[in-house]
Every structure is written in structure tokens, then in C-alpha cells.
Image: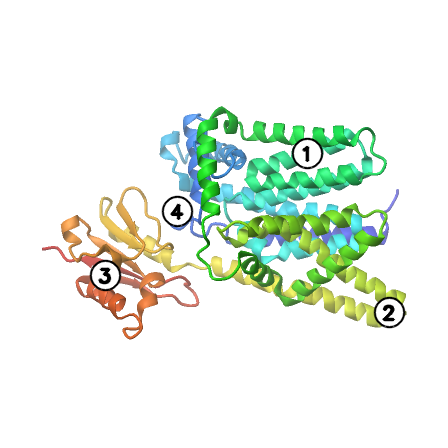
Amino acid sequence: MIHAPAHVKRARLGLFLALLTAALLRFWALSQGIGFNPGVDEPEVMERAVRMMKTGDLNPHFFDYPSLYMYVEMAVSIVRFMVGAMQGKWSSLAHAGTEDFYLWARGMTALLGTLTVWVVYRAGLRWGPQVALLASVLIAVMPLHVRESHYVLTDVPSTFVMMVTFLLSLRAHERATLGAFALAGLAAGLAGALKYNGILAVVMPLVACALTPRLRGSRIVCAMTIVAVMVGAFLVAAPYTMLDLPHFLNQFARLSSEYKMPAAVSEPVWLIYLKHLRLALQWPGSLMVIGGFAVGVWRVARDQDRLRWVLAVAFPLLYFRFISQQNIIFARYLLPIVPFLSILAAAAVVTFVAWMRSTGVPMRVRHAITIALTVIAIAPPAYRAIAYDADQAKTWTQALAYDWIRRELPPGTSIRLEGSVAPKLPGAYKVTYAKQLRMDGTPDYAGKGIQYLVASSQVYGQYDSPVVFPAEHREYQAIFGQTDEVARFTPSAEHPGPELRILKVRQP
């Protein structure tokens, strides 16, 4: 019987622990907000996935995102419906609401987020098992990746497939066959079918093709094959891009124009994204990433086998520049480069340890420094990730308000809510939303048929000072004075969220 060497067993155990950690952090508190406060843009995917399941119409009629993840979540919803039907939960599709499918849909995102850790490990083996293991742990606890793995959005799935493209590009470089490069091109096409900017992943197999010295066949043929397979995969995975071409082009043009509108921020976009990265990595991790870039540039100049370093350094810079040219800013847009930064940070640590060994630093000192570097790289992001999940696992004020309304107010009640984090109420209620209640400009809510208001400190809390905001403060005090407060949900350590006041409109 052949036994695996001790270092292989340790690596396997380390990978298992990294995957277990990643899964726990991504599946913990997965149900937060379902039914009353979904994440920003989650309904864009879920409502279309459920509609396609119920109608059989596979045209999403929506092209702000490509359609692949809608199809994936449609398949998940079908399985969820069949399981629920067998359990007696539903007797027809009409009995199932979109909110019934969120938990399983989020589970798919969490699964892909966890699998990203495995792909990072496999790619990191090109730098050695130490780099692979440390990089996989770093991405496992990365708070930005942990947070976004809780939502039905395209960023985590596209990051997963872009990392698969990276891994397949390295593999194609090693095998130097046309089929291996075509497979990497296929992955790039699927990345684009998940999120349009995922198309940038095609740069990786193209660069690998250009830098493979013993390529079997013509480089031109190789590059054309990569692009052709990429386009084909994109169109198969998002077919209505062509089948509903005018609608796609119109929405794509509108979306592109929105991203080019002047940004409503005072700082350069690239600087805002750097701050987001610093928050995700914390200062120790940020310094290690800078060190990893320095090592990468040095290796590109010196190593004969430089492709891994070229891709690890150049692709995140290319992607960062691309999103920095867009004027709609979300931290989640940085996700595709986070795995690369994890690899570079790990490479910096391992390179430093190797340098200590070569300069004769005593083993005990080396081990102590290695442990210290590992801890300061992992502990700060892990702490933030755990804190985020622990916070999400609590009962938020929106949930308390939602439950109170469902319990105390009958269906058909007309309710007006304010703010972007107000609880989303079922269709049985007559619900309208306002950016700010004070902007309604009328005290005559009863004349408009509105029976209740829900005021949020996310909005009115900005105007607490009658000195700084005299007009706004006065307008909110007028609203509070002309209504009767029937419930208030104040945030606490156990119940985070905004303060919510439920106000009954006085009837004439």
C-alpha cells in the first residue's frame, strides 16, 4: 500500500480546512433579509429566473446582466420547487412566490464562492504548495468575497469562472495543445456570459498562447480558436443576445451611457477602489500585496517560466484600470482581482521566508517570523468576515418592523415607506416608496388614501440638527406631529439596522 508523503497529507488537510472555513463563512446567515430586505440588485436576477421557470419563456427581456446566471438560478429554482412540491409545500407554480427561492439561490452563490478557494489553490500550486495553501486561506477569509457570496448576484460566479480561465490558461501553457487553449477560451466565454466585463478573461489564454514557447501549431490559429470558442460559448450561454438583438443593443447602449455619466464623487474612481481594497485586505495584507507585485515584476524580468507571473501581475492591473474608467462604483466590482491579490500576497510571504533561509537566518527565527506573517495576513480579514456574518445573523430592525406589519395590519392596508433599506412588503399590501417622506410635500396623506407611514433614521436621522438643517428638521417634525406613532424599532447590539417608526395617518 502506497502512503502519501507527510507534506502532501498536510497540504490536503490545510486545503480541507480552508474549504471548510470558506463554506462556514459563506453559508452562515445566508437567510438574512429574505422576503423583506433582499440585497441590492438581487431581485433583478431572481424575479427573471422565477418568471422563466413559471412561463417557459427563456428570453430574460433584460440585458443589464448577461443571462447565464439567470439560467443557473432558474435550474436551482426548478429543483427547489420540485423538492417543495414533494414536501407538500405547493400544489402549483402559482402558489410559489419569488421569495420562496432565495435561500437555495443564495446557496448556489455561496457554493461557487467556496469553490473559488479550491481553484485558487490549484492555480497557486504553480508557485508551490506553500503559496497555494496560504492564498487559498486568504481568499477563504476575505471579507469582501465572504460578503458578496451571500447574494444572488453575478460577481461571485463570474469571479469563479474567471479564476477557472486563469487555471486553464496556465494548464494550456503547460500542455501547449490547441484543445487546451480552446478550453480556456470556452471558460472566458462563460465568464462573459455571467457578467459582461468577464470577457476580459480572454486576455489570459491569449497571453498564454503568445508566451508558450513549444506551442503545437500556429499562434495565429491558436489565438483565432480562443476567440472563436469564446464567442461561441458566450452566445450559447446567453443566446438572446443575438435572438433579441435590437433589445440587447438598446439596453447595452443605455447601460454603457450610465457607466460613463459623471461620477457623483469628489475623489478619483481609482482611489476609491484602492480604499475598498485596503479595507478588504487591511494594512498588513495590503503591504504583502504590494510586495507580491514587486516580486512579480522582478520574476517577469528574470524567470524563463514567466507566464504565471505575467498573468498574476498584469491581469489585475488591466481589470482595475477597466473598472476605474467606469463611473458607477461598487466594491463588489473588485472581486475578480481579489484571488490574484491573494496569490501575490502569499508569494511575497513565501519569497521572504526563502530569502531568510538563503541568508542563514536561524530556523527558529524563520519559523517564528513565518507564523507571525501568516497570522497578521489572515487574522484581520478573518475578524472582519466573522464580524460581518455575526451581525447578519442577528434580527435586524427591518425584520422586526416587517413582522409587526404582517401581524398587526390587515392585507390591503396602504403604506408609504422611505429610504433604500426599508422593509419590502408583500403584494397583499398597497405599498409605495419615497426617497424621503419630507419630499412628498403634503401633510394630506389621508386624502391620498395612505393609512400608515414608515420613517427611517437612515433618512430623517441626517436632519437631527435644527441648526444645521432647519428646513429639513422642521419638515420631519411636522410629519411626526401630524401622525400617531404606533410602533418604534430602535437599533441595539442585538437588533442592528436603522431606527424605524411606524406612523398612523390621522383620518379626517
Discs 2/3, front: 2
Left or right position of 83 against 205: left
Q: Quadrant of residue 53?
A: top left
Tell me which label, 2 or 1, sits earlier in the chain: 1
Would you name the residue on which mark 3 appears? 486
Q: Is residue 399 above or below residue 123?
A: below
Left or right position of 11 against 453: right
Q: Which secondary structure, mark 2?
A: helix
Q: Is residue 293 above or below residue 117?
A: below
Front one among 235 and 403: 235
Instruction: Measure how far apart labels 4 and 2 are at the Cα level.
Output: 56 Å
- The residue type indicated by label 2 comes to Met
| Residue 288 image offset from top left, x and y in percent | 70, 63
Would you name the residue on which mark 2 appears? 363
Q: Which secondary structure, mark 3?
A: strand
Would you name the residue on which mark 4 appears? 35
Pointers 3 and 4 in contact (CB under 8 A)?
A: no
- The residue type indicated by label 4 comes to Gly
